[in-house]
Each structure stands twice: as structure tokens, then as C-alpha cells.
Amino acid sequence: AQSVAQPEDQVNVAEGNPLTVKCTYSVSGNPYLFWYVQYPNRGLQFLLKYITGDNLVKGSYGFEAEFNKSQTSFHLKKPSALVSDSALYFCAVRDRSTGGFKTIFGAGTRLFVKA
Amino acid sequence: EPEVTQTPSHQVTQMGQEVILRCVPISNHLYFYWYRQILGQKVEFLVSFYNNEISEKSEIFDDQFSVERPDGSNFTLKIRSTKLEDSAMYFCASNKAGGGQETQYFGPGTRLLVL
């Protein structure tokens, strides 16, 4: 069965410091991996995705994520956090071997960036 | 930039009543989805829809739920007899092509409250 784990409910970072939001996954086949961000009372906004190729994926707003197949991880990173990055972040996976229709989301990690 | 829209933004209903949530996906997209997010919890897949039929559904999507594309633009989720536990934010999403690698674009959501 597919699953996504985000081990931290909350991450606190000072503005200007690097941030990491962790994600590990479990799928039977090869994954498609995604990060979405949710601001209060808003829908999900796509940040970035890993499909194939280079393990380091760059996305919107300066975020990047590294796919690590051996560790089944896809951690979200940003070199220098902004207060405006404070939001709820969701890691998500689709199993390409099952057609990729269903997206499984992690529980979410709330990021607080303090000025 | 084209976006997914959803109406209404909020809906309050009595237990046992039928509700229809409406979505207008991005116009050249072919794959449509419904997700829900119970307050404070993770986003859960409900159903995917392509070529006028359900591609995949979760165990949450029981006989009380149905989806329809009544015309060329709308995509609806009907809950026949609402229960208290149906209270959640419901998100519609769409993407252009299949295969799982396509980015899903989410609407802003409909907050459903069942009393």
C-alpha cells in the first residue's frame, strides 16, 4: 500500500536560515513525488515534483527537494527562509505502476518562520 | 493564468440532506479529482474521473457519493444523505493528461458543514 510520512508536525526556523521539511514514502513501484503548500483558508498550491532524472528538483519560490531512492525520501529544502514561507506543507506520492490516478498525501508539516 | 474554480465557497446543511458541490476544471484538462480535508487532518483522495467514468475511488467514496460531468465545463460531487462526519473542506483538482506525472491543479475548496 502507498503511504507518505511527514515525521514532523511543525518546523520552526528563523528568517534567513535554511529550512528542511522531511518526507518519506512507501510505494510498490516507482513513485511520482510532489510537494504542495497550503496557506490559511486557501487551496493547495503546487511547489515542485520529481518524475525522473536529476534527483535535485527545483520549484517555485526558491524551494527545492532531493529524491533519495535508497532512503525513500523526498525532503523539501530552501537555503534561506522567509516569514512569508510560513504555511502548511504537504508531501504527496503517486504510484506510476497503478496508473497514477490517486495521490496520497502526508499529514502535513506546519512551517513557522520567525522574523 | 487559468485556474480551477469551486462553488459555493461555504455550505451549511442539515444531516440527511443532499448537497452538490460544483467545480469548473481548467478548460483543456481531461482528468478530474475530488479530495477532502477534515479540519486539521490530511488531504484524502476521494475519486478520479476520466472520459466520463470513474477511474479510481477510495474506500471513503461509498454509495452516498457520486460524481458527474453534466456538461463540458462543470464537474460535480453529490453527497446523497449527508452525515456529520462529512463536514470537511472539499477540493476539486484537474490535470491535462494521464500517467501520473502531470501536475494536479487544485481549486480553493468548498467548506461543508453538516449540522
Image (cartoon, coloured by chain):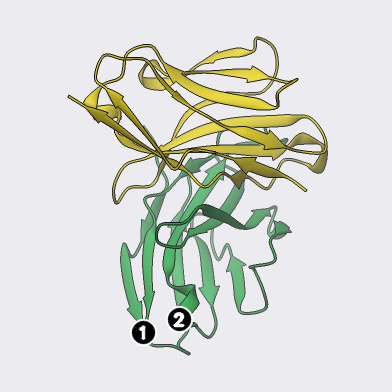
- Chain in green, by letter, is B
Secondary structure under tag 2 reads helix
Mark 1 crowdedness (10 Å alpha carbons): few <14, some 14-19, many ≥20: some
Q: Work out how far the residue at label 2 is from the one at label 1, CA to CA, in angstroms.
A: 6 Å
Q: Position of residue A13 (x, y in %)?
A: 31, 25
Q: Are marks 2 and 1 in contact (CB under 8 Å)?
A: yes
Q: Which colour represents chain A?
A: yellow
Q: Is residue B27 visible?
A: no
Question: Which is nearer the eye, A51 or A56?
Answer: A56
Query: Residue B115: which disc?
Result: 1
Residue behind mark 2? B84
Quadrant into which the N terminus of chain B falls: top left
Pointers 2 and 1 within a single chain: yes
Q: Which label sits on residue B6?
A: none
Left/right placement of residue B5 relative to residue B70 reads left
Q: Residue at x 56, y 44 (%)?
A: A106
